[in-house]
Every structure is written in C-alpha cells, then in structure tokens.
Amino acid sequence: MNYPQQSPIDIDSSTIRTSEVWHPSCSYPDARWQERDSPFNAGMVPVPAGSGGHLRIGDGSEPLAVVEFHTHAPSEHLWDGVQGAGELHIVHVDGDRTSVLALRLAIGRRNAAVDRLLERQGALSALLPPGRTACTYLGSRTTPPFGQEVRWFVVDEAVEVTDAQLRALVGEHAENARRVFDLGDRVVDAAALEVDGGP
Ligand SMILES: [Zn+2]
C-alpha cells in the first residue's frame, strides 16, 4: 500500500502557517561530486560519501547527511498553482529518516554556484538564496518507492539559472516531474532556514 501522504503538492502561500516548531539548519561545505544516474533523474553524490554536508531538522536533532542532489524539469512543487522551470532536490538521510530540501529554479541569470557543481565541485550552500524561508510539510519521495515518509523543506524564493544550466543539470531526464497530490489534512509550516557554509 502506498504511503498516503504523497509529494509533490501545490503550495498555497496564503495558508502557510508561521511556526516556532521547526528550526532547520544546514551545513554544506565545499565538496567533490560524482555523477549518479537512475531511471528517473541524473544526480550527483558527494565523494567521499558524507562529505556533502548535513541538515538538522530541529535544535539538537541528529543530522541527516547529504546523499545526493538531483534536478527535475519542470518543477515538481507548484507555488500558488504555478509550475516553475525546474526544481533541485538535496536529499538527506539518517538511517530510516529522509528529508529533502527543494530549491525552485527559474530561468534567468547565469548561476556561478551551478557552474561549479557542474564541474563536480563546490558547496551546495552557495546555491541558497539569502534570507531563506523554507516551507515544510510531510510527504513522500517523488520517485519509486513512493511509500516512504519524507520531511520536505521547500525554499520560498526561486533561484535563477540559465536554460543551458538547467538542461545540463537534468541531462537526459527532462519532463521528469511527478504530478501534484492533494494536501489533505496536512499543514505547511514556514521556518527560517539557517545555513552554515563551513564544515
Ligand atoms: Zn527529486
């Protein structure tokens, strides 16, 4: 049976709750990256494993290590009903806990941080826009197997990349966005995202 709380969703910005519950913080140091291909998307994994940084969901919680990042085009999450050009997912795992930080990508200026990542180096923290708020909800993976609980953090501000950079990120896997699912009785909370670029 499928896990009932599926992703992605259409985020209705008028219903996002301001919450004191979530204190996400991430640390994404400079790392080296290696391509990883799957039937669903092209991604990159940190080399050696575990060197890409981590995410903490709350104060004092155990960190979840970056296991990969990959990109969808167009975006998977909608924002007030609008689908973006792309969406980059930073996947974090600790045992059976999974959390994904989603960055919405818009076509615009060349992004130097993306260039570095495409050269198999660089820090994911350089991708994050300043003054970030992340919208968090409980969902699933958007590629098989879907039946797994995932804590999502979707950054509210879109990051600009060029069309060529987006195409380089998705590789052979354009049009790989899953359809959106009803939020149901789930809630979307807003939380300030702390970013530490250090190790
Ligand atoms: Zn994804």
Image (cartoon, rainbow, N blue to C red):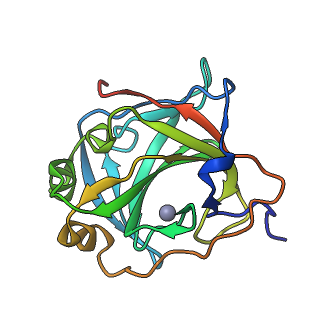
Using the rendered image of the protein, determine whether residue 97 is visible from the camera's viewpoint: no
Classify residue 101 as left or right of residue 167. Answer: right
User: Relative to residue 139, is residue 47 depicted above or below?
Assistant: above
Question: For the point 38% across and 44% down, which residue is it?
Answer: 49
**x and y percentages locating residue 53 in the rendered image:** 38, 35
Position of the C terminus by quadrant: top left
Of the pair 93 and 175, the residue shown nearer to us: 175
Using the rendered image of the protein, determine whether residue 70 is visible from the camera's viewpoint: yes
Pick out the residue farthest to the top: 60
**x and y percentages locating residue 116 in the rendered image:** 16, 50
- What is the quadrant of residue 161 in the picture? bottom left
Question: For the point 34% across and 37% down, which residue is it?
Answer: 51
Pick out the residue farthest to the front: 14
Classify residue 180 as left or right of residue 164. Answer: right
Of the pair 119 and 193, the residue shown nearer to us: 193
Question: For the point 21% across and 54% down, which residue is it?
Answer: 114
> How many numbered marks have been drawn onto this rendered protein structure?
0
Question: For the point 64% across and 49% down, which residue is it?
Answer: 14
Classify residue 91 as left or right of residue 109. Answer: right
User: Relative to residue 20, is residue 55 depicted above or below?
Assistant: below
